[in-house]
Amino acid sequence: MRNAFAILCIMTTLATPRHAAAQIATELHGGVGYTSVSVDAWAGTSAQDWGQMASGYYVQVFPYQRGRISVGGELGYEYFFWYDIFYNGYTSTRNVSATRVAAVARLGLGGPAYAEAAASMHLFDGFSDPGIGVGVGYMLPINEHFSVPLGLRGDLVLDPDTQLFASRFNVGIRYSF
């Protein structure tokens, strides 16, 4: 099985046209925003206090590009919100965050504008939830290899008890090989 996978990887690399290999890009993003969520439903009890400021950072790699469409993957960390609950005579603060793993497709909209969509899995402490993400952005070129992506991104986490939606403004750095 391992040999078959290695042969498939080698064949895919050899079959990729040189101009497509030259389009491989890596991006690092960070951003802040707001999470829409029913805090009481997420906590399973009445929250005493909470804050819904969202933040996150992630890396995207786009190894495949055909025309205006790029396909790749994403790995990142998302901080969604915090809340306080009263438990056994004490106040307990809970921070809600997750590691996100996603497959990403990006469509160039002409010029430096783009739109992207992601199918993701959010790995919380002790459980996982699927999600979807959408975003739009603008690439500010620096030189032949570097550019600065600016964008708006929304991620919907499909938890069975309550859904949460984090929207963020992101700034990043892109390196194109």
Image (cartoon, rainbow, N blue to C red):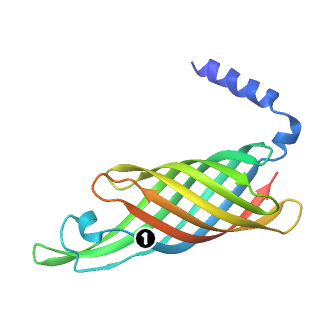
Q: Is residue 38 left or right of residue 70?
A: left
Q: Is residue 71 left or right of residue 146?
A: left
Question: Residue pushed farthest bottom?
Answer: 49
Residue at image x 57%, y 64%? 153
Looking at the picture, which amino acid does disc 1 mark? Thr
Image quadrant occupied by the N terminus: top right
Return the x and y of residue 44 as percentages of the image width and height: 20, 64
Question: Residue pushed farthest front?
Answer: 109
Q: Please tell me whether residue 76 is drawn above or below residue 148 in the rendered image.
A: above
Q: Please tell me whether residue 115 is drawn above or below residue 148 in the rendered image.
A: above
Residue at image x 80%, y 54%? 176
Residue at image x 10%, y 72%? 88
For residue 76, which quarter of the picture?
bottom right
For residue 28, which quarter of the picture?
bottom right
Q: Please tell me whether residue 156 is drawn above or below residue 170 in the rendered image.
A: above
Return the x and y of residue 117 as percentages of the image width and height: 59, 52
> Is residue 80 or residue 38 the one in the foreground?
38
**Total number of numbered labels?**
1
Q: Is residue 94 left or right of residue 45?
A: right
* Label 1 crowd bin: few (<14), some (14–19), many (20+), radius 10 Å: many
Return the x and y of residue 140 as percentages of the image width and height: 79, 69
Q: Is residue 15 left or right of residue 118?
A: right
Residue at image x 51%, y 74%? 33
Element class at badge 1: strand
Q: Please tell me whether residue 42 is drawn above or below residue 16 in the rendered image.
A: below
Residue ID for mark 1 = 35
